[in-house]
Amino acid sequence: MTPERLFTTTIPGLQKRKHGGPPIAMVTAYDAFHGRLLRKSEIDIALVGDSLGMVVQGNASTLSVTVDDILYHTRMVSRGLMGTSLLVSDMPFLSYQPSVETAIREAGRLIKEGGAQAVKLEGGEAFAETIRRLTLSMIPVMGHIGLLPQRVHSMGGYKVQGRDKEAQDRLMNDARSLVQAGIFALVIEGIPWELARRITEEISVPTIGIGAGPHTNGQVLVLHDLLGWSEAETLPRFVRRFGQAEEAALDSLRRFRLEVSGTTYPSLEESYSETEQ
Ligand code: KIV
């Protein structure tokens, strides 16, 4: 068996890739098993996303996720990664919006207690001061603009953003303000690819797109979507299912049930005997 090659993603290393090298691959992870998968497939960044409210907890939105939830999942992912992919944790709804002090305290918990190396938060210029204070407090921040799941109600659903000139100017301005505030990378979600390309060309930090076309400096997907572990009917256009995990899991579970009910599992070879030591 070939020994596993361990790699380490660093923030300076990611930033260099703005100017060359392969685009950045980022995937969500929610437990140690996911962390191991990302480690073994050499994914650059593991994101403990607040999407866990939907894909793990089964809620209709991310809004009910708490810092304790993110902390619990961050610790598990950290054990699976073993210091390889950069570990970024999401700041959930109302963990940073109330005040800068709240943001520093809650982000600090994710770093100190969870083992995250950076945090991500949703929002544009309105959060520039919060991001500036977080980075001054030595907490690396990844920005997130465009379609913001924590704004699902004010957006009227999960809708593509930046369709008209005014919204496009606002998003460009948001991107610039967040870079000035000190973000090391920017997630851009659910916007037309032409706008994502303009933002990517304009700003000095790597952009990581989701539903933002091929011209960003990296891509992020939710693990369950990528593996083919979520309902295909409900997936947005940009999701490519790189696997058929649900079909494979269902097939294994059905075969287990049939073999148990048909008494063909376990065999004697799969059992312990009194005659062996
Ligand atoms: O919560 C999440 O998983 C995210 C990504 C999809 C970017 O924010």
Image: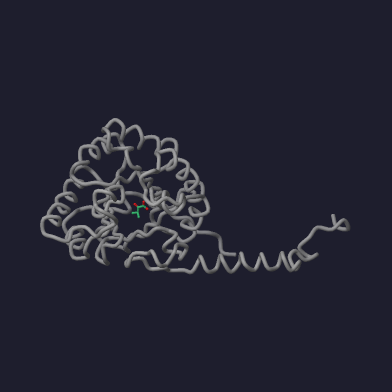
Q: How many marks?
A: 0
Q: In the displayed image of the protein, which residue is found farthest to the top? A: 101
- Residue that protrudes farthest toward the right in the picture: 275
Quadrant containing the N terminus in the rendered view: bottom right
Q: Nearer the viewer, residue 16 or 168?
A: 168
Residue at (28% x, 49% y) in the render: 153
The percent coordinates of residue 72 (x first, y second) are: 47, 41
How far across and down, in percent of the image, does residue 56 sit? 46, 51
In percent of width and height, residue 162 lies at 18, 58
Give the quadrant of the C terminus: bottom right
* Quadrant in which residue 215 is drawn: bottom left
Q: Is residue 194 above or below residue 105?
A: below
Image position of 99 (left or right of 234): left
Q: Is residue 238 left or right of residue 40?
A: left
Q: Residue at x 40, y 67 (%)?
A: 233
Q: Is residue 37 above or below residue 247?
A: above
